[in-house]
Amino acid sequence: MSHMVSLALAFGRQDLLKKAVEALGYTLSENVKQARYYGGQVSQVDMTVLLRSYDLGFVRKRAESTADDVTEAFSVGSVLTPVYDPWHGEVERVFGKRLCKLSEEYYKELMAESAVCSGAFSTTASDVSVRSTADSIILELEV
């Protein structure tokens, strides 16, 4: 039986999420409020990335901060949590297993913006390299 899953990911910046989705060749739509999954079923969401048959949806949730929270400091009280149906495999083929490709692009955008905001230097996400391990994403800024 197929079902929607919600990952323990929290994207605090909608503008950076949009850039990350676009970097992977897709569009984040604020106008589509349903994500399609198995058997033509739909789930109510706040934003959607439309794919061929199954969609990636995002649900806005209130941010819960903890001392080791990965939600960035720029978040203004809410985060976008991804929801999708993993059964068909389409979402993970596009965005990586457990959305690792999307997370990498998102944090590349965040790191590039942080470098510019701190006044350290002018950079773009293409100046950031990414290495993934089993339990972490390592970002390196080329200067």
Image (spheres, rainbow, N blue to C red):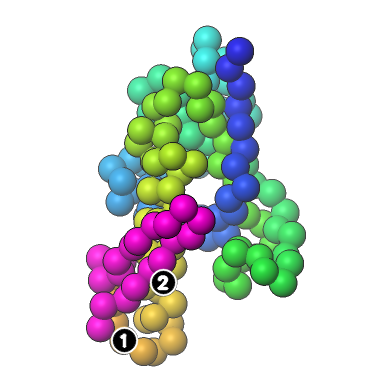
Give the structural element (helix, strand or loop) at label 1. loop
User: For the point 30% across and 69% down, which residue is it?
Assistant: 128
**Residue 121: assigned label:** 1
Say which residue appears at 67% left-offset and 57% top-offset: 78
Image x and y of residue 85, in percent: 53, 26
Q: Is residue 110 left or right of residue 78?
A: left
Magenta part of the chain: 125-143
Q: Tell me the amino acid under the disc marked 2.
A: Met
Mark 2 and mark 1 in contact (Cβ < 8 Å)?
no
Q: Is residue 129 magenta?
A: yes
Q: Secondary structure at mark 2?
A: helix
As for residue 61 lying within the magenta part, the answer is no
Going by the numbered disc 1, the residue's amino acid type is: Phe
- Residue tagged 2: 111
Q: Earlier in the sequence, mark 1 or mark 2?
A: 2
Q: Callout 2: 10 Å neighbours few (<14), some, many (20+)? A: many
Q: CA distance from mark 1 to mark 2?
A: 12 Å
